[in-house]
Amino acid sequence: RTRTLSLPPAAPMDPDLVSLTSVHLFVSLQPGTGSYTATSTLQYQTIGPVDTLVFHAKGLKIQGLKATQNKRQLVVASRSEPNDSHEVWLKFADYIDVGKVAVMVSYAGSISDTNLYGVYQCTHTKSRDKVFMTHMEPGYAKEAFVCGDDFSIRPRWTVELQVPSGMHALANMPLQTTKDGGKVAQQTYHSQLDGADVPVRILYHKGSTEAPQILTAALQGLQLFEDYFATTYGLPKLDVVFTPRMMLGGMENWGLIFLNDSDTKSQGKGKKADEKLIDLLMHEIAHQWIGNMVGFPFWVKEGICCFLEQRMGDIVNGRKSKAPPGKASAVQSDVAQDCKDDAKKASETGNAGLMFSGLTYQRSQTFIEDHANKLGDARFRDWLREIVAYNIHEYVSEE
């Protein structure tokens, strides 16, 4: 399945004639130099005559570029970045034939020790072990790798990581060769829908005490969400990793959830802190379906997952439901427009972080809560089930 590349109206690449279908990424970390080198091979599919292809990159030093079709090298007449959305436009000397086109881009990037997005490093406070991480949502992927950095672009990815000696790697899918460090708590989740056995691991560092309850909650959460969506989890594993430092409390990477260890510690200890951590885990597990399995605009998926975080968090934490009474407000359209305006401003300014605000989350949750109250929980659940079932690996627009 392919998705159309989303572009502003002024772009010369017709989104109805070309799609980005796959990306092969090779990354070589060089921690001693504070940098990394990488190659992205972007596979496009054209269904009509085009003379321009587009990808995203920000702050990356492009060192080489080659485009081929049917083993024939294509002539790139010009390369430009004509707007503030960090798009790179490749203008070809001639129109490209219908079919597959491969664009190989080699480049170098910096490993930040101050910014918490793109590719960055952080250190465990006690052991001083270094961790190299990515944070790529809602619009930071282009600061890490050459890619199509838009929610509606959903290519198939393959990834190769060249990791320095003494380090190990974790990724969204099982690695062919890897060594696991730190502490690992693991159990197997048995799906009642398709009978699959999914290993669930909690990876944590010395001194962390939350792993056992997080493992239990993760297993329960998978069961709750499979039942809720009537769709199997679908991936061959789920890792939940306590990371030293992040922009927010958690990140829903598909099959590789991050929880911010420093944020967890700042919450202190006790029942309320434990419940808050489990609520966060429910939010990130919800994203495995809403946002990962099926793509949505940022504010829509966050609103749905905030709604589900509350519902499933109540169940797992064994507390009385905090859901508001079933009365829809009259501000749905205004809230939706506010969220769209936030996303538009973030896109126009190139500052994706504008969408990562408490106000955006609050507005989007209000919008979803209103719809759920209007429909009733059962009808709202059935509506979500239908959307998920018919759009697996696809993108659902605001409309």
Image (cartoon, helix red, strand yellow):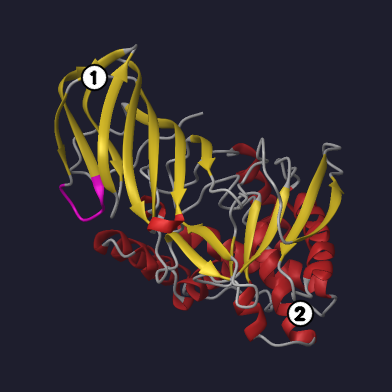
Q: Is residue 43 above or below residue 202?
A: above
Q: Is residue 397 above or below residue 319?
A: above
Residue 2 appears in the rendering: yes
Q: Is residue 308 above or below residue 331?
A: above
Task: Specify the principal SS of the magenta part.
Answer: loop
Give the secondary structure at mark 2.
helix
Query: Which amino acid type is marked by label 2?
Result: Asp
Tag on residue 373? none
Crowding near pointer 2: few (<14 within 10 Å), some, many (20+)?
some
What's the distance in space between the residues labelled 2 and 1, CA to CA?
A: 57 Å
Question: In terms of image quadrants, where is residue 63?
Answer: top left
Residue 322 appears in the rendering: no
Crowding near pointer 1: few (<14 within 10 Å), some, many (20+)?
some
Q: Position of residue 118 (x, y in %)?
A: 41, 58
Residue drawn at (18%, 51%) of the image = 83
Query: Which amino acid type is marked by label 1?
Result: Pro
Residue drawn at (21%, 33%) of the image = 90
Give the secondary structure at mark 1.
loop
Along the viewing direction, whichever of 374 and 305 lies nearer the viewer: 305
Membership of 262 in magenta stretch: no
Task: State the residue position of label 1.
Answer: 49
Question: In terms of image quadrants, where is residue 5?
Answer: top left
Task: State the residue position of label 2.
Answer: 274
Residue range corresponding to the magenta coloring = 82-87
Q: Position of residue 49 (x, y in %)?
A: 24, 19
Tell me if 392 is positioned left or right of 342 in this view: right
The mark that comes first in sequence, 2 or 1, is 1
Tell me if 101 is positioned left or right of 246 in this view: left
Q: Position of residue 337 (x, y in %)?
A: 38, 66
Q: Position of residue 172 (x, y in %)?
A: 61, 46
